[in-house]
Amino acid sequence: MADKLREHFSKIHIPHGRKGQREQREWQRFQIPGATISYQLHSLLGWRQKAFTEKTYPLLDLSKGGLAFLTDSPTKSARRISLLLLSPKEDFLRLEGRVKQVSPMSNNAVSNRYRVGVQFEPFGHRPGWNAPDTLKVLERLEQNYVPSNTA
């Protein structure tokens, strides 16, 4: 039975990169016009802090492995984060992830001064993971928003 469960989760688990490896993107990044993010940080002990942000922040790009958004308050890398993806043409989507990168923006004209890169937690039926149906929604969004190759 354990082997069957392991095989099942290996099919839907999205692997995390290993420290020291050169980053390689496995999924196409895409943009959703007008999409924004609301987020909720977790404490170091795993407890969620406060509620989701009242303010929404611009989504920069999205893939099946993660997303990037702009914010006006920096956070530390490796923090767990819960996200609400809000799109004008879609229902909201809740995602679980980990902050992987925080970069200050050099453009003073940008009011949201930090770019936050988030890697999604795996997809499966475990606490803290993203629901498998969430991956299906991301695949549908990818089909709708990734430009077709015109070779």
Image (tube, rainbow, N blue to C red):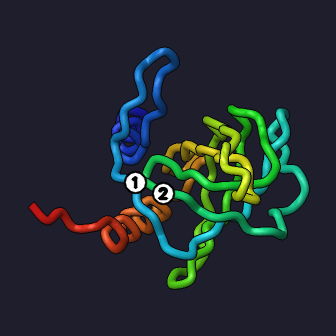
Above or below residue 101? Residue 138 is below
Amino acid type assigned to the residue bearing label 1 in the image: Arg
| Mark 2 Cα shell of 10 Å, populated few (<14), some (14-19), many (≥20) | many
Residue 26: percent from left, percent from top? 34, 41
Q: Secondary structure at mark 1?
A: loop
Kindly identify the amino acid type of the residue bearing the numbered disc 2.
Answer: Leu
In percent of width and height, residue 90 lies at 52, 81
Label disc, if present, on residue 134 of the rendered structure: none
For image coordinates 36% across by 70% down, the residue present is 145
Task: Say which label, 2 or 1, has the lower sequence index.
Answer: 1
For residue 78, what is the image quadrant?
Answer: top right
State which quadrant residue 15 falls in. top left
Residue 86 percent coordinates (x, y): 62, 73
Tell me how far mark 2 sits from mark 1, CA to CA. 5 Å
Can you say which quadrant of the picture contains the C terminus? Answer: bottom left
Residue sitting at 62 percent across and 46 percent down? 97
- The reply, left or right, for residue 73 in relation to residue 98 is right
Give me the residue at 48% from left, 57% from top: 62
Residue 118 left/right relative to 52: left
Q: Quadrant of residue 38?
A: bottom right
Q: Give whichever of 60, 113 is nearer the camera.
A: 113
Pointers 2 and 1 in contact (CB under 8 A)? yes
Disc 1 residue crowd, few under 14, some 14–19, many 20+, Cα 10 Å: some
SS assignment at label 2:
strand
The residue carrying mark 2 is 62
> What label does residue 29 carry, if any?
1
When the figure is inspected, residue 17 is found, relative to residue 55, above or below; the finding is: above
Left or right position of 98 against 65: right
